[in-house]
Image (cartoon, coloured by chain):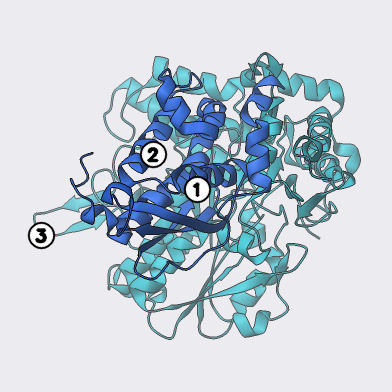
Chain colours: A blue, B cyan
Amino acid sequence: MSSLQDLYQQVILDHAKHPHGHGLVEVADGHLGGESHQVNTTCGDEVTLRVDVRTADTPDARPTVERVSWEGQGCSISQASTSVMTELVTGQDLATVERLDAAFRDLMGSRGKGLDDEDVLDALGDGTAFTGVSQYPARIKCALLGWAALKDSLARSGALADRPGGSDD
Amino acid sequence: MTATDAVRPDDAMGSRELAAVRADFPLLGRTVRGGQPLVYLDSAATSQKPNVVLEAEVDFYEQRNAAVHRGAHQLAEEATEAFEGARSAVASFVGADDDEIVWTSGATAAINLVTYALSNATAGRGGEAAARFRLGPGDEIVVTEAEHHANLVPWQELCARTGATLRWFGVTDDGRLDLSDVDAVITDRTKVVAFGHVSNVTGAVAPVAEIVEAARRVGALTVLDACQSVPHLPVDLHALGVDFAAFSAHKMLGPTGVGALYGRRELLEAMPPVTTGGSMVEVVTMTETTYMPPPQRFEAGTQMVAQAVGMGVAAQWLGDLGMDRVAAHERRLAAELLRITEIPGVRVIGPTDTTDRVAVVSFVVDGVHSHDVNQVLDDQGIAIRVGHHCAQPLHRRFGLAATARASASVYTGVEDAAALREALAGVRTFFGVE
């Protein structure tokens, strides 16, 4: 059962049971908002995710993810991954969110080997608990469901276009 | 009397015979996930293949490969004989005549073939002979809520092309077709009734006779999705009285890439072609073409000859074993698989007894998502299917996005069902759900 316990680390089971950001919240006045509905066509799992982006009075004047809220149903991997993602990106500027997204996708593509860069691993925090998922091609989509919804909802919010320096960060 | 009622329990295979059957399937001997024996309970998705089928394909390529129905050399003769011999084997296996079997790439292609033939007839192709197939606004096509997407989406598309309206039978709480409103659903407006013989989710066997009788009363065509019945039950299409039927080789121990459309002779004769090109024509001029009689009219282009030969051998292999015995064996497997309901938190979607059902058992484990259930089973070498099994409306009917499904075939043993039970018993504990 070792590979199974490797996959379902306690942190994943905990997040799946008590997910962060669950329950849709209205976007604050004056903030940019975007919403996305994503479906995993393999299993019918779905998530509706809403992002709230603060563009004024932010540190270094960078647009920042104020809040991620979502609802949906799915397996423990997709629920936990969306929960961990919510924690990781809340309060982060959009360039950091983009880097986290790329780092998590790299981790999912690592075929169980994980990533070497200590700084990236530090930045991913609880996200590194999903390393075991990358051994199972059928489950990678589960782990990326929430991330796909975040990316799409940010694009829909219009915040990416407003960002200083464009999207080539 | 239904197909499953006709089977006596004492027809079932003994353990020695089952061991001999299993020895014919090389893949069943491999190990998975760190050297564990494979417990294959995903035969409703695709079956494993006996040696005779694999050897038939190799033998065809090594000894007989040539273009069929063309060329007059010896190889062409032998290839054509193998190809048509396979058609004959498949036809007799399902109680049809040889020229009523059209090769297709599978059941999906077979059902689509019927829908596009009806479209073409609606557009005026096939002339007056095909007028009976024309559809338009006011006409209705009836399906069921239990259908596999392959027997639902093509009919939705046909309705969109012709202006016909789609109607359907619902499903009861125990997963059977709800025919209580049969006279309100099948009416004078009904032109086609398309339904699955056996649900790939609930395993329930449809009351074919009742549906065919209702369709006949109003002159509607019947189309049977026989994918989950032909590999598991004795099926006699003439006796069932359906107008069309579709089934795939890969679910009945045969190769992928081949399947069959059955059509009653007089209907196939009247039907316009769908895919056109070589091998299906009589006289071609620069302006018009006349077509061959069925089944060749519906077999344009180079066919999947080696796979067809493999399908013929698979039909022969099952026929030699005897479908009554296959059904009896799988009926016992259905009972064994249904014992998962003894495990706390496990709920079966579909009939929970073995009356008029096959060994396809879909279930949920309360508090644990089906993908997570699957992961625990896969970790122990047990292969099942999870998801919506290409039947989203049926899952929606039960308020579910996904289920887990265990399914048996002729080579499945009671030990496989026991392994499933044992593994399932630990699932809720693993995820801390009690």
Q: Looking at the image, is A132 positioned above or below residue B237?
A: above
Q: Nearer the viewer, residue B240 or B366?
A: B366
Image x and y of residue A129, in percent: 57, 30
Q: Looking at the image, is B369 positioned above or below residue B213?
A: above
Q: Chain of mark 3?
A: B
- Residue type for callout 3: Thr
Q: Chain of mark 1?
A: A
Mark 1 or mark 2, which is nearer to you?
Answer: 1
Residue with the mark numbered 1: A86
Task: Report the residue that reaches farthest toward the left.
Answer: B286
Within 10 Å of the Cα at label 3, are there few (<14), some (14-19), or many (20+) other Cα atoms? few
Residue A101 — which label?
A: 2
Quarter occupied by residue B13 = top right
Residue A18 as seen in the image, left or right of residue A130: right
Residue B17 as seen in the image, left or right of residue B407: right
Residue A59 — which label?
A: none
Mark 3 or mark 1, which is nearer to you?
Answer: 1
- Residue type for callout 2: Asp
Within 10 Å of the Cα at label 1, are there few (<14), some (14-19), or many (20+) other Cα atoms? many
Residue B372 as seen in the image, left or right of residue B263: right
Mark 3 or mark 2, which is nearer to you?
Answer: 2
Could you tell me which quadrant the N terminus of chain B lies in? bottom right
Residue B293 visible here: no
- State how far apart marks 3 and 2 are (Cα): 59 Å
Question: Which residue is depicted at the point 60% across and 67% down?
Answer: B144
- Residue type for callout 1: Thr
Residue with the mark numbered 3: B287
